[in-house]
Image (spheres, rainbow, N blue to C red):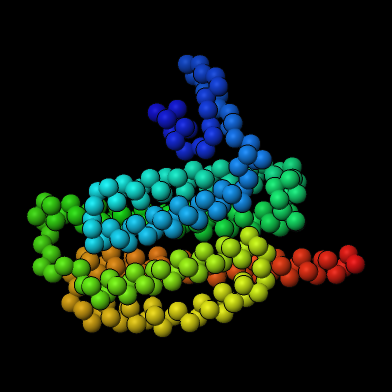
């Protein structure tokens, strides 16, 4: 059981020695082979894919789609643990330049980003767990849904979720590029999405939705809003980092 957990959870981990009471693991992936930036970029793709599939699963409620989200959550966690391990190794030895960072402060920046991406995957898993329970109640005839999923609500939810994904992707791209201007634009844009969220909440309240469906829709709305907030947070961190780097360069001159 422990061996399977290690293999499934720790990216690049292999058992190199084993006794009755002890297992020795070694991480065979080197940073140069899979840099932190590449791991984080992959995390973004995996976590957003999990979130997208989780929301699509409300309408389809397909076990294959459920499993896809579970697998993506698992992959995001493995990548996150790998990134944290590399960050811990680097900060203990002050290897920020070797990791591609300009200052030691970037250890904290990347740790926050990894945590945000992990949370996106966790939210997706939470949605799917609720959908699995929901579908089981229907299959066991403990719950009867009179009406299909409201198309107007679902369409607006998909649109809001798509906007959240786009903003988060733009925020991470600006962070990787150290783009001050793009980060500033993303922060300014966040407030313009509040009316969309307000309208979606209003629309949901005017519909005669099944309470179980309404609760799941609210989970999905909340997860999309958090993705927007994470994008804003990352942009603010990018902005602060870029300003500090510019000020430092002037001081050096």
Measured as percent of width and height from the top left, residue 226 is found at 45, 67
**Residue sitting at x 26%, y 56%:** 131
Left/right of residue 241 with respect to residue 170 in the rendered view: right
**Residue sitting at x 48%, y 32%:** 6
Left/right of residue 74 with respect to residue 189 in the rendered view: left
Measured as percent of width and height from the top left, residue 55 is found at 32, 62
Q: Which of 229 and 184 is in front in this view?
A: 184
Query: As displayed, is residue 191 above or below residue 83?
Result: below
The quarter of the rendered structure image containing the N terminus is top left
- Asked whether the viewer can see residue 164, the reply is yes
The quarter of the rendered structure image containing the C terminus is bottom right
**Residue sitting at x 56%, y 43%:** 82
**Residue sitting at x 33%, y 57%:** 54
Furthest toward the right, the residue is: 253
Left/right of residue 101 with respect to residue 35 in the rendered view: right
Measured as percent of width and height from the top left, residue 164 is found at 45, 69
Query: As displayed, is residue 161 above or below residue 8?
Result: below
Q: Which of 193 and 3 is in front in this view?
A: 193
How many circles with numbers are drawn on the protein?
0
- Asked whether the viewer can see residue 226, the reply is no
Which quadrant of the figure has residue 216?
A: bottom left
Q: Nearer the viewer, residue 111 or 166?
A: 166
Measured as percent of width and height from the top left, residue 125 is found at 36, 53
């Amino acid at each position: 059981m422990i061996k399977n957990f290690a293999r499934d959870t720790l990216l690049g981990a292999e058992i190199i020695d084993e006794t009755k009471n002890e297992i020795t693991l070694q991480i065979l992936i080197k940073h140069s082979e899979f840099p932190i930036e590449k791991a984080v970029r992959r995390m973004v793709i995996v976590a957003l894919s999990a979130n997208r599939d989780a929301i699509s699963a409300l309408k389809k409620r397909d076990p294959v789609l459920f499993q896809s989200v579970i697998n993506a959550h698992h992959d995001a966690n493995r990548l996150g643990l790998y990134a944290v391990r590399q960050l811990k190794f680097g900060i203990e030895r002050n290897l920020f330049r070797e990791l591609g960072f300009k200052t030691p402060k970037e250890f904290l920046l990347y740790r926050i980003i990894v945590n945000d991406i992990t949370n996106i995957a966790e939210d997706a898993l939470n949605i799917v767990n609720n959908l699995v329970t929901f579908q089981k109640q229907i299959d066991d005839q403990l719950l009867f849904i009179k009406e299909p999923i409201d198309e107007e609500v679902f369409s607006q939810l998909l649109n809001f979720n798509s906007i959240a994904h786009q903003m988060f992707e733009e925020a991470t791209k600006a962070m990787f590029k150290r783009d001050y201007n793009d980060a500033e634009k993303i922060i300014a844009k966040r407030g313009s999405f509040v009316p969309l969220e307000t309208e979606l909440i209003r629309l949901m309240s005017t519909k005669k939705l099944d309470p179980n469906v309404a609760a799941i829709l609210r989970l999905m709305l909340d997860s999309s809003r958090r993705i927007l907030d994470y994008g804003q947070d990352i942009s603010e961190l990018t902005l602060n980092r870029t300003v500090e780097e510019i000020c430092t360069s002037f001081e050096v001159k």
